[in-house]
Every structure is written in structure tokens, then in C-alpha cells.
Amino acid sequence: MGNSEWQNLKEAMAGGSGPAARKSAADAMRELLKSSQMKSNPVLVSLNKSGKYPTSIPLGQIPEQMEKNPQFFNLIRRIIEKGGE
């Protein structure tokens, strides 16, 4: 995983939460995923059944969900803020 791609994602996530900000963050996430050399297909799992997004999402589909779903975008933002140090 590239450090510059990670920094770009953190900066994009720190912006607003409107459609343009979500698209920018999704593009940054795509670049990060492209730069990582994963040989497996990990899945993000959320136990929050009340969310308005799927509870199991392959990493490759995260950018798409970030763009179209503000609630999911905010979840990813919280994850990055807490774990991105």
C-alpha cells in the first residue's frame, strides 16, 4: 500500500460529504486499492444491521458504495480517522 495514496485518501476524506467530495474520496480509494498488491479478495463486514448499505462488501466495491451512499461514506470516514494514524 502506497503511503502517498493513503495520504491522498485521508485528505479526500477530510473534505465535505457532498457528492463531489464522495466522488473525490472514492477516486482516492480506487487509487489506494490499485496500488496495494493484494493476492486475496478481502471483504469489509459491518455488524450494523440498521445501516442503509450492505453488511458485507468486497474491498473492490467500497469506492462505488462511498460515492452513492452518504451513510457508508461516513462509516468509512470514521474508520479512516480512527485507524489512519
Image (spheres, helix red, strand yellow):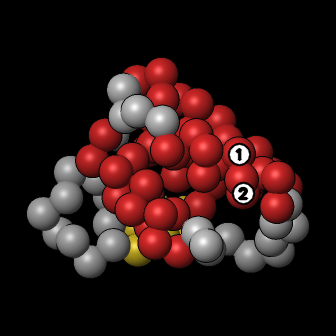
Asked whether the residues under the numbered discs 2 and 1 touch, taking CB atoms below 8 Å apart as contact, a structural biologist would say: yes
Quadrant that contains the N terminus: bottom right
**Which mark is on residue 29?**
none
Q: Position of residue 38 (x, y in %)?
A: 80, 71
Using the image, determine if residue 38 lies above or below residue 32. below
Residue found 19% across the figure and 58% down from its top: 51
**The C terminus sits in image quarter:** bottom right
Per the image, label 1 sits on a secondary structure element best described as: helix
Would residue 41 appear left or right of 75 to someone viewing this image?
right
The CA distance from mark 2 to mark 1 is: 5 Å
Q: In the displayed structure, does residue 14 sit left or right of residue 24?
A: left
**Above or below 41: residue 14:** above
54 vs 70: above or below: below
Q: Nearer the viewer, residue 25 or 11?
A: 11
* Number of other residues with Cα within 10 Å of mark 1, as a class: few under 14, some 14 to 19, many 20 or more: some
- Image quadrant in which you'd find residue 8: top right
Q: From where the camera sits, is residue 62 visible?
A: yes
**Residue occupying image coordinates x 35% and y 58%:** 75
Q: To which residue does mark 2 refer?
A: 6
**Left or right: where 15 falls relative to 6:** left
Q: Amino acid at mark 2?
A: Trp
Q: Position of residue 57 (x, y in %)?
A: 46, 62
Which residue is under mark 1?
8
Secondary structure under the numbered disc 2 in the rendered image: helix
* Amino acid on which the number 1 mark rests in the picture: Asn
Is residue 22 shown to the viewer in this render?
no
User: In the displayed image of the protein, which residue is found farthest to the top?
Assistant: 20
Q: At 82% from the left edge and 52% from the top edge, which residue is drawn? A: 4
Total marks in image: 2
